[in-house]
Image: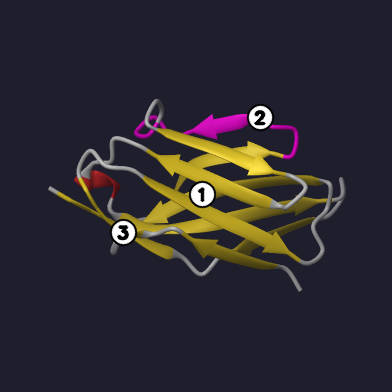
């Protein structure tokens, strides 16, 4: 019922920029958090950035100052502007939606999009 459609991944040189987009459709509740996570083979999936429906943001230390998360509530879309990219940023990036009505919670994931940063 809920789908997350991602776009914007690809190959970029170190120091370059990419902009990821994730559009959520379906039963989106007013209380929610959207975010981006990334994962490389053999390692855990880590939080990159999150943003609440009220606009409060959180960033991983490794990306703070380089990445910016934003959202358009009217479109239920979250963006991740990635600047000054490093090879260490190479990973599969996943869009996440945490949906809540105050008592029940639902978590949804996008399909993942590959981001590759070359030296």
Q: Give yes or no for contact between labels 2 and 1 (Cβ–Cβ under 8 Å).
A: no
**The N terminus: image quadrant:** bottom right
Horizontal and vertical percent position of residue 13: 20, 48
Q: Nearer the viewer's eye, disc 3 or disc 1? A: 1
Main SS, magenta residues: loop
The residue sitting at 51% across, 40% down in the picture is 49
Horizontal and vertical percent position of residue 40: 31, 59
Question: What segment is highlighted magenta in the picture?
Answer: 53-63
Q: Give yes or no for contact between labels 3 and 1 (Cβ–Cβ under 8 Å).
A: no
- Judged left or right of residue 51, residue 8 is left
Task: Using the numbered discs, state the Cα–Cα distance from disc 2 to disc 1 in whole angstroms.
Answer: 14 Å
Residue under circle 1? 36
- Residue 40: mark in rendering: 3
Residue 57 falls within the magenta-colored stretch: yes
The residue sitting at 41% across, 53% down in the picture is 38
Q: Please, what secondary structure does the residue beneath circle 3 have?
A: loop
Of 117 and 107, the residue lying toward us: 117
Q: Nearer the viewer's eye, disc 3 or disc 2? A: 2
Of 102 and 69, the residue lying toward us: 69
Task: Using the numbered discs, state the Cα–Cα distance from disc 3 to disc 2 in whole angstroms.
Answer: 27 Å
Mark 1, other Cα within 10 Å: few <14 / some 14–19 / many ≥20: many
Q: Please, what secondary structure does the residue beneath circle 2 have?
A: loop
The residue sitting at 72% across, 52% down in the picture is 76
Residue under circle 2? 56
| Coloration of the structure image | secondary structure
Task: Using the numbered discs, state the Cα–Cα distance from disc 3 to disc 1 in whole angstroms.
Answer: 14 Å
């Amino acid at each position: 019922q809920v789908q997350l459609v991602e776009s914007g991944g690809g190959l970029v040189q170190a120091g370059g920029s990419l902009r990821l987009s994730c559009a959520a459709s379906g039963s989106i509740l007013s209380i929610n958090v959207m975010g981006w996570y990334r994962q490389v083979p053999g390692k855990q999936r880590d939080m990159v950035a999150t943003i609440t429906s009220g606009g409060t943001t959180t960033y991983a230390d490794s990306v703070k100052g380089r990445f910016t998360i934003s959202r358009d509530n009217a479109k239920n879309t979250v963006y991740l502007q990635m600047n000054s990219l490093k090879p260490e940023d190479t990973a599969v990036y996943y869009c996440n939606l945490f949906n809540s009505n105050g008592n029940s919670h639902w978590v949804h994931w996008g399909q993942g999009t590959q981001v590759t940063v070359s030296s």
